[in-house]
Image (cartoon, rainbow, N blue to C red):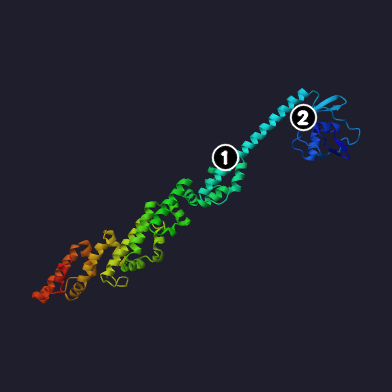
């Protein structure tokens, strides 16, 4: 029998909390609340509990007797774990079994829910780690505890307009999506985004410029829908036609397009702000200008260069004609050979004006009027100087045979 003294009760062997409550003229729930007891069916001999203020604490307390019941003035009663009292053991047992089953079911559901949440948190955390995101376990746990499923969280993260911590972290990792949405373009899924980054990186690695595959650079490619093929073309253009170009081509490029920084020509070529066709044209024009330099037309870039043709406009005109680097080299070599003599004859002859402009027109355009002017000068040269002197080395007649 429990010993009640000075507002406390010491549990004896065979005591139940229901018996103690009846003995102390209180309820099981009151004792449980006063002592923080979570399982009213589990008490041990020797434990000391504090009794509620209204409990009987003297010798007048009712004495407990019988298993699971206490003797009261009305007879033996049985008390369930929720404090319900029964006058028959059968009714008590049936009710208590129902309580126990409900408690077990709730515990199982809680455990299952907890297990599912743990699995969801682990799955989403692993997914984010594969995206290269940092530790977002706290934000993930909070979202799962709010009842969000992994599918809901995944969709929420990919919303470029969301301010949720997970979405913000996602936007930081995949910044081009927000820019694409603002431009009216479709948003890429993480797998599409990562695949694009891998393709760009592999291209730049193959050209030995993997250091340029920065997050910002890759983001700019994705934002502007630059294909991996175009990236390869841009890098090839920079490496093969500029970085490894001859000094004359580089000099012409610096003259015509100083904004294309040759110290970082690959980086300059990778800027989507300049379209690939425009870049290819700039290099073509520079190669044509370089060919003029290589032919000894050292006035390239000076005030009176190419006479009535503006330097850059002249090379642009040749580019419009589809003149290649090799064609430019051949043509400008011919122009360089014939122009000095033709200009001299133009000065001492009458009726014809044939200089570098006309030589270029004849060499690159096949202009008939330029050809006639040169032929007229040739005839005047032969007539003026007579005999074989008109065909000696250095004469216009001798130069034209290997020119046009």
Residue in front for this viewpoint, 384 or 75: 75
The correct choice, above or below, for 338 with respect to 227 in the image is: below
In the shown orientation, is residue 156 left or right of residue 210? right
Q: Which mark is residue 311?
A: none
Residue in front for this viewpoint, 11 or 273: 11
The residue under the point 33% across, 61% down is 240
- Dot 2: element: loop
The residue under the point 74% across, 28% down is 96
Q: In which quarter of the image is the C terminus?
A: bottom left
**Occupied quadrant, residue 12:** top right
**Occupied quadrant, residue 298:** bottom left
Mark-to-mark CA distance, 1 and 2: 39 Å
Residue 272 location (% of width, % of height): 41, 56
Residue hosting label 2: 80
Residue in front for this viewpoint, 71 or 368: 71
Residue hosting label 1: 149
């Amino acid at each position: 029998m429990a010993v009640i003294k000075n507002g406390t009760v010491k549990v004896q062997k065979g005591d139940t909390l229901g018996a103690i409550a009846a003995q102390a003229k209180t309820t099981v729930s009151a004792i449980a609340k006063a002592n923080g007891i979570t399982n009213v069916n589990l008490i041990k001999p020797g434990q000391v509990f504090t009794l509620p203020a209204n409990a009987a604490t003297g010798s007048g307390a009712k004495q407990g007797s019988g298993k699971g019941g206490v003797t009261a003035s009305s007879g033996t009663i049985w008390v369930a774990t929720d404090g319900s009292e029964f006058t028959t053991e059968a009714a008590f047992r049936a009710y208590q079994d129902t309580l126990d089953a409900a408690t077990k079911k709730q515990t199982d559901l809680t455990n299952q829910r907890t297990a599912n949440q743990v699995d969801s948190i682990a799955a989403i955390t692993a997914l984010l780690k594969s995206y290269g995101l940092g530790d977002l376990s706290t934000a993930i746990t909070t979202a799962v505890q709010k009842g969000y499923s992994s599918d809901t969280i995944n969709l929420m993260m990919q919303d470029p307009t969301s301010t949720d911590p997970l979405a913000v972290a996602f936007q930081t990792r995949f910044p081009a999506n927000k820019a694409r949405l603002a431009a009216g373009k479709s948003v890429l899924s993480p797998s599409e985004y990562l695949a694009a980054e891998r393709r760009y990186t592999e291209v730049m690695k193959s050209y030995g410029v993997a250091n340029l595959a920065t997050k910002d650079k890759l983001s700019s490619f994705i934002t502007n829908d630059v294909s991996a093929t175009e990236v390869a073309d841009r890098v090839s253009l920079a490496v093969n036609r500029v970085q490894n170009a001859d000094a004359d081509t580089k000099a012409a490029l610096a003259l015509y397009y100083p904004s294309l920084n040759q110290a970082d020509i690959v980086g300059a070529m990778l800027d989507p702000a300049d379209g690939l066709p425009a870049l290819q044209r700039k290099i073509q024009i520079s190669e044509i200008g370089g060919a003029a330099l290589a032919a000894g037309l050292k006035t390239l870039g000076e005030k009176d260069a190419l006479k009535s043709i503006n330097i850059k406009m002249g090379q642009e005109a040749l580019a419009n004609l589809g003149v290649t680097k090799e064609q430019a080299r051949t043509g400008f070599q011919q122009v360089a050979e014939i122009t000095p003599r033709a200009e001299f004859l133009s000065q001492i002859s009458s009726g014809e004006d044939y200089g570098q402009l006309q030589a270029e027109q004849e060499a690159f355009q096949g202009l008939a009027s330029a050809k006639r002017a040169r032929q007229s000068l040739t005839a005047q040269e032969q007539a003026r100087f007579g005999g074989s002197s008109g065909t000696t080395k250095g004469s216009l007649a001798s130069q034209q045979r290997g020119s046009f």
